[in-house]
């Protein structure tokens, strides 16, 4: 055995830890509502996403998860607080800077669909054609590499109508990583998948993150799969962080909010109803 191995291993580990500590996205004390006077969606929200990590953002429907992705992508700007991507304030960017920043983000949209009139190959090639001047040869190699990474190199010539839902999700994944983005955001990547495809997709998200040395932000409701692959988890409640920690820490938590999620109980601190008038006011009756 090579005697220098223990040394190089620990140097490697230190380098990895340093790389891990680099903050790719920092959200600091953000307040946000979609329009003046409208309901505040996020209030005093702070979170960090570090290089090399898969970080999950969980929380009830309508709590603002997709909104957080839109703020990071610069589609909307917070009324106060900052959203930094690679140290740059997304809320202060002009259109050129925004375009450059977005090129460094891969996004798998909630209900994200493929372009139905383009083949699997052309779907993945799309961002490369949009954003680069690669030769046709190089582009082909890159697309096939991405399709290979998701196990669908052989499906390159099929049309979206000829592949299953799980396969389509993997093609969308290949498209999201086409430009080798340092940040990949997934909005409900598991929705509607059978348990096998779900497990495969979860594993892929972890493996692609590690292979690319990227940072992945995963919005999802699937506790089990997420806890298998995530380094850190944020639970959103009332516009802010309700709980956070590693999957191990959260699994041990006795916090009623965390338990409601992990045990999938219908009753608990997370309200079922969208905020509005009381039942009594809406129906003009006295409700006890
Ligand atoms: N473009 C918009 N204009 C106004 N309000 C919006 C807009 N998009 C979302 N909202 C509101 O903001 C709140 C948060 O929405 P968001 O889509 O971020 O929730 P979510 O956590 O992603 O929910 P889900 O898990 O159901 O996808 C909701 O109350 C929603 O009605
Ligand atoms: Mg959403």
Image (tube, rainbow, N blue to C red):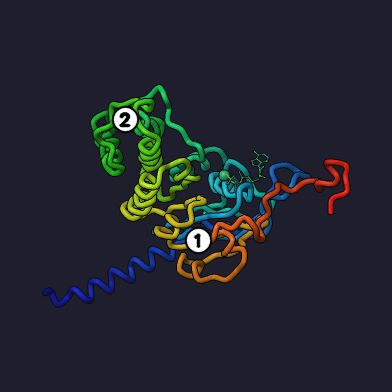
Residue 74 position in % (x across, y down): 57, 44
Q: Quadrant for the N terminus, please.
A: bottom left
Q: Residues within 10 Å of mark 1 (few under 14, many from 20)?
A: many
Q: Quadrant of ligand 1?
A: top right
Q: Is residue 199 above or below residue 10?
A: above
At 45% from the left and 57% from the top, the residue drawn is 224
Q: Position of residue 287 (x, y in %)?
A: 84, 50
Q: Earlier in the sequence, mark 2 or mark 1?
A: 2
Q: Quadrant of residue 248?
A: bottom left
Dividing the picture into quadrants, the one containing residue 3 is bottom left
Drawn side of residue 225 relative to residue 277, left or right: left
**Residue designated by label 1:** 233
For the point 51% across and 67% down, the residue is 250
Q: Are marks 2 and 1 in contact (CB under 8 Å)?
A: no
**Is 286 in front, or is 20?**
286
Query: Could you tell me residue 66's position as x and y percent?
Result: 57, 46
Residue 132 shows in this picture: no
Apparent side of residue 208 relative to residue 233 in the rendered image (left or right): left
Please identify the residue farthest to the left as the structure is shown.
1
- Quick one: quadrant of the C terminus? bottom right
State whether residue 86 is above or below residue 128: below
- Give the residue at x 44% y 60%: 227
Q: SS at mark 2? A: helix
The image position of residue 27, as x and y in percent, is 57, 57
Q: State the mark number for residue 211.
A: none
Q: What residue is shown at x 62% (from left), y 55% (from top)? A: 266
As measured in the structure, the alpha-carbon distance from the residue carrying label 2 to the one carrying label 1 is 34 Å
Which residue occupies the extreme top position in the image? 117
Nearest the viewer among 282 and 130 is 282
Q: Nearer the viewer, mark 2 or mark 1?
A: 1
Drawn side of residue 29 relative to residue 187, left or right: right
Residue annotated with mark 2: 121
């Amino acid at each position: 055995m090579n005697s220098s191995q223990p040394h190089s291993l620990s140097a490697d580990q230190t380098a990895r830890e340093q790389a891990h500590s680099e903050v790719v996205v920092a959200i600091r004390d953000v307040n946000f509502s979609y329009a003046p006077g409208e309901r505040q969606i996020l209030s005093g929200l702070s979170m960090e996403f570090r290089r090399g990590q898969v970080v999950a953002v969980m929380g009830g429907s309508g709590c603002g998860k997709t909104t957080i992705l839109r703020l990071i992508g610069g589609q909307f700007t917070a009324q106060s607080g900052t959203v930094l991507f690679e140290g740059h304030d997304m809320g202060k960017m002009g259109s050129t800077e925004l375009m450059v920043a977005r090129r460094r983000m891969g996004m798998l949209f909630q209900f994200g669909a493929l372009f139905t009139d383009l083949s699997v190959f052309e779907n993945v090639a799309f961002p490369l054609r949009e954003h680069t001047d690669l030769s046709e040869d190089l582009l082909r190699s890159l697309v096939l590499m991405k399709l290979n990474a998701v196990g669908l190199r052989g499906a390159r010539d099929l049309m979206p109508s000829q592949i299953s839902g799980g396969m389509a999700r993997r093609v969308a994944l290949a498209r999201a990583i086409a430009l080798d983005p340092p940040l990949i955001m997934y909005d409900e990547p598991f929705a509607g998948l059978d348990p096998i495809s779900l497990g495969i997709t979860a594993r892929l998200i972890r493996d692609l993150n590690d292979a690319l040395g990227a940072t992945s932000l995963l919005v999802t409701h699937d506790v089990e799969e997420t806890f298998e692959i995530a380094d850190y988890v944020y639970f959103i409640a009332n516009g802010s962080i309700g709980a956070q920690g590693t999957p191990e820490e959260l699994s041990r938590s006795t916090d009623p909010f965390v338990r409601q999620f992990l045990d999938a109980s219908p009753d608990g601190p997370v309200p079922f109803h969208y905020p509005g008038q009381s039942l009594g006011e809406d129906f003009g009756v006295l409700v006890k």
